[in-house]
Image (spheres, grey):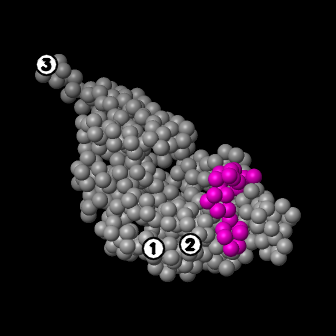
Amino acid sequence: MSLSKMCSIVLAVFLLTGLMACSNSASNSGSSPQNAGSTGGQNSQDNKSADAEKESVKLRYMVWGSPNEKKAVEDYSKKYMEMNPHVTIEVIHVPNNDYATKVATMVAGNDEPDLAYMSEGQAYELAEQGKLYNVFEQLDVDPDFNLDNYAPNVWYEWEPGKALGRRIGIGAMGMYYNTDVFEKAGIPPLPRNPEETMNWDEFVELAKKLTVDQNGKTALDPDFDHTKIKQYGLMFETWWANYLPLVLSNGGGYATEDGTKFGLSEPEAYEVIQQMADLINVHHVAPSPVQLKSLPNLATSLQSGKAAMAFGGNWLTLDLSAAGAKFGYGLYPKMKENAAVILASPVVIFNSTKNIEEAWKFYKFAADPAASVGIYADGLSIPVLKDWLTDEQKLSQWAVNDKHPDGYVDVMIKPLFDENTKPGPADLLKNYSKIDTIVTPALEEVWLGNKSAQDAMNEIKPRVEELMIGEYKWSR
């Protein structure tokens, strides 16, 4: 190394040390974008002289999502690059339907990105092959990385003490309702207090009252014509995130706790699934899967009054708000006790990255709503950092606004910290993707009224349990 270059490095270090000493020592939590993204928490111009001495780094970041999500990712990536001029981030956006194939192709060609969104099953598979970085290694390296700063149930552990990553953001389920429809029918808002949650019979009665045929008759009327429904009391898609909260509420589960027995074949589960199917085929208050295909999506149906209520994820807020819908939130009805699910896919770092330190800094930065508050304020996602879910001042920056009507925090946020809120089968169950190819078609027969839930689940039980080899045990 030349003497002049050595002197310049020493001078840069000296200047950086002096700047650090003058900075506000209070910013040591590791949750701010500056701490997450740059040495010593220095910002913009003050940091550029130090960055000039750093080797240039390029990170490839592969994501899926809507145009709104793509823009949000590009915006916070640009912000990070402005704060860290030596880093270039290439955002690779891949359509959802092509994503898993793209990942497999890149892995096969030894051309993995540095960081990537990933489906649960594919992430576990690659982690077990040694392809993904164990982010828990940073617990011994990064003093700012503290699991207590994160919400529960967000770290994907494929072995005890080994995590392939965190959720991209948190997904939560709740009930939505059209406030105009409720007011017109003289019905009070849906309950948001767990102590006031409807039981199942009360919920069915409400759904009947809100289901109206073309002659103005409700499903409570003997002359109601279920072949000519103008307004459904309820709409829901038939995937696990919509039925599992009610199964958990009844004391059941998708699988037993050890992940070796099929929980949906037990009475606590199949009785709930049958009651949900009865909403379609007996009470005629919800459309069947076939009817859903000819109807507008959930957000449009709710906004237009085609549906009075809907089971849906927090991300539905984005579309409803964008459409100018008048809507509110309510807790799921309960069978025996209140219960909920938490969901969303992981974001990972590949072991093949040549820049693990820089990848990790950006990884932390991307989790901080201070860097990308718009993606949360618009209703698309929920932060993984705990203080953004509990601190009133931080909640006011994203969850309390005209895009999140009253009830959002009570319905979507507070249940995340309840002991009866559980990750879903895609998060925990080994071989889930294979199991799902058996379970979903069998459930379709139930939703269509062709088989009882008990018969359908017991028929597939032997095949399902052949694939059940256990669960991934999350410690947090």
Give the farthest residue toward the right: 215
Q: Earlier in the sequence, mark 3 or mark 2?
A: 3
Q: Residue at x 79, y 62 (%)?
A: 228
Percent position of residue 377, x then y? 58, 48
The image shows residue 32, relative to residue 468, as above or below, that is above
Identify the amino acid type marked 2: Lys
The image shows residue 394, relative to residue 339, as above or below, that is above
Q: Earlier in the sequence, mark 2 or mark 1?
A: 2
Q: From the image, which quarter does the N terminus lie in?
A: top left
Secondary structure at badge 2 equals: loop
Secondary structure at badge 1 equals: helix
- Within 10 Å of disc 1 (Cα), the crowding (few <14, some 14-19, many 20+) is few
Percent position of residue 86, x then y? 33, 28
* Frontmost residue, 168 versus 215: 215
Residue 2 disc label: 3
What range of the chain is rendered magenta? Answer: 280-304
- 360 falls in the magenta region: no
Q: What residue is disc 2 on?
A: 451
Q: Is residue 85 left or right of residue 415?
A: left
Q: Is residue 227 left or right of residue 126?
A: right
Q: Earlier in the sequence, mark 1 or mark 3?
A: 3
* Frontmost residue, 50 versus 126: 126
Identify the amino acid type marked 3: Ser
Q: Residue at x 61, y 59 (%)?
A: 289
Q: What residue is disc 1 on?
A: 459
Secondary structure at badge 3 equals: loop
Q: State which quadrant residue 60 falls in.
A: top left
Alpha carbon of mark 2 to alpha carbon of mark 1: how far? 11 Å
Identify the amino acid type marked 1: Glu
Q: From the image, which quarter does the C terminus lie in?
A: bottom left
